[in-house]
Amino acid sequence: MPQTVDHVRLSRDGRALVILDQSRLPNHSEYIVLASAEAMYEAIKSLRVRGAPAIGIFAGFAMYVLARRMDMNSRAAFDKEFFEKSAYLNSSRPTAVNLSWALKRMEGVLSAHGELSPGELLPLLKAEAQAILDEDIAMCKAISEYGLSLLKEGDGVLTHCNAGPIATSRYGTAIGPLILGAEKGISFRAFADETRPLLQGARLTSYELQKAGVDVTLICDNMASIVMKNGWVQYCFVGCDRVAANGDAANKIGTSGVAILAKHYGIPFYVLGPTSTVDMNCPDGEHIEIELREGSEIREKWYSEPMAPEGVKCYNPAFDVTDHELISGIITEKGICRPPYTESLKKLFE
Ligand code: MRU
């Protein structure tokens, strides 16, 4: 039986993608059906599907769905359209490497089977998308186990953004250890930064942790320092969108500030992510493209009326890069990498 997750899945007839619209959480659990490349692009861009691994899983199934609608009579025409659609989806958001990583895996099916007809390729494409999902499920479980091995009962863990089940497949990465701990009857105290401007921490992390029975306290981003000063935080666990070969790690905007604070207070700061998020072709954080988003997300969102003057200039980078020197360890499904990361990350791929 193929494994499934509820928040990114194929429709019954396999001709469309069904996803939980994360932009509507926590008040509305709405599922949307996507069948065109344009709708899929929009879903990524608008963060209806978000979180680096979940975007990768989505991209795998998306390419299968799109492939089913392509010209089945000519392999050349099929390939051309497949690569065009893949490039189009890849242009939706630049920072999370899992998107291009998953699309390359799907393209690899075509490259490895030049002899097959489009119809013969379809089951292979479906199997590759399924493999991306299955592997992520296993990776998240292993990451959660490694993260859990660092913690002792009652520890306080601060996290930023959302790196939970809906951002991945199951368990998640950064909050996976807390959810796994709850399953095993071990309790921790989680602190979730609300994560301006799109509130992934408030809307998604506190929602997922509460649902899993974890003791979670929601704080505004500018409260992390006092919470650390109070002695309530023993570890910072965050996710990642792209880890460079030297250990610099891109994650949701504000993550690097948390790492700087953690250093000040002597709190270990860990980045958790699957090896699919490690980009060995990217030498350091300087080479990670940071997505810039609309200023309206800062000016106009969430309140019943805008809380900033109309037209005020805004700067809205979606991610920042945490310098590897601030990172105590990078937890992957293959174990906990320690500095120097140029060596420990390289070993992951040997
Ligand atoms: O803009 P988002 O919500 O897609 O940003 C997501 C994050 O920064 C997550 O922390 C990261 O993708 C890891 S998800 C396991």
Image (spheres, grey):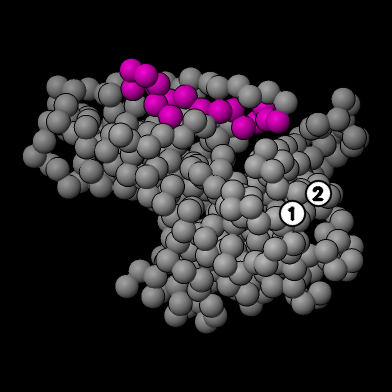
Tell me which residue sits at (39%, 42%) in the image.
133
Question: Is residue 253 among the parts visible in the rendering?
Answer: no
* Residue 318 in picture, x, y percent from top left: 66, 48
- The amino acid at mark 2 is Thr
Q: Nearer the viewer, residue 273 or 77?
A: 273
Measured in 3D between alpha carbons, the distance from the residue under mark 2 to the one under mark 1, in whole angstroms, is 6 Å
Question: Is residue 69 among the parts visible in the rendering?
Answer: yes
- 301 versus 349 height, above or below: above
- The amino acid at mark 1 is Ala
Residue position for label 2: 217
Assign a secondary structure to mark 1: strand
Magenta residues (range):
9-26
Residue position for label 1: 190
* Residue 308, picture quadrant: top right
Is the residue marked 2 within 8 Å of ligand 1, measured from its CB? no
* Residue 118, picture quadrant: top left
* Residue 82, picture quadrant: top left
Q: Is residue 180 left or right of residue 233?
A: left
- 74 versus 112 height, above or below: above
* Mark 2–mark 1 CB contact (< 8 Å): yes
Quarter of the image with the C terminus in it: bottom left
* Residue 334 in picture, x, y percent from top left: 42, 66
Crowd around label 2: few <14 · some 14–19 · many ≥20 (10 Å) = some
Quarter of the image with the N terminus in it: top left
Tell which residue pokes out farthest to the front in this image: 185
Tell me which residue sits at (85%, 68%) in the image.
231
Crowd around label 1: few <14 · some 14–19 · many ≥20 (10 Å) = many
* Residue 263 in picture, x, y percent from top left: 75, 75
Tell me which residue sits at (27%, 38%) in the image.
127
Number of marks in picture: 2
Query: Is 69 one of the magenta-colored residues?
Result: no
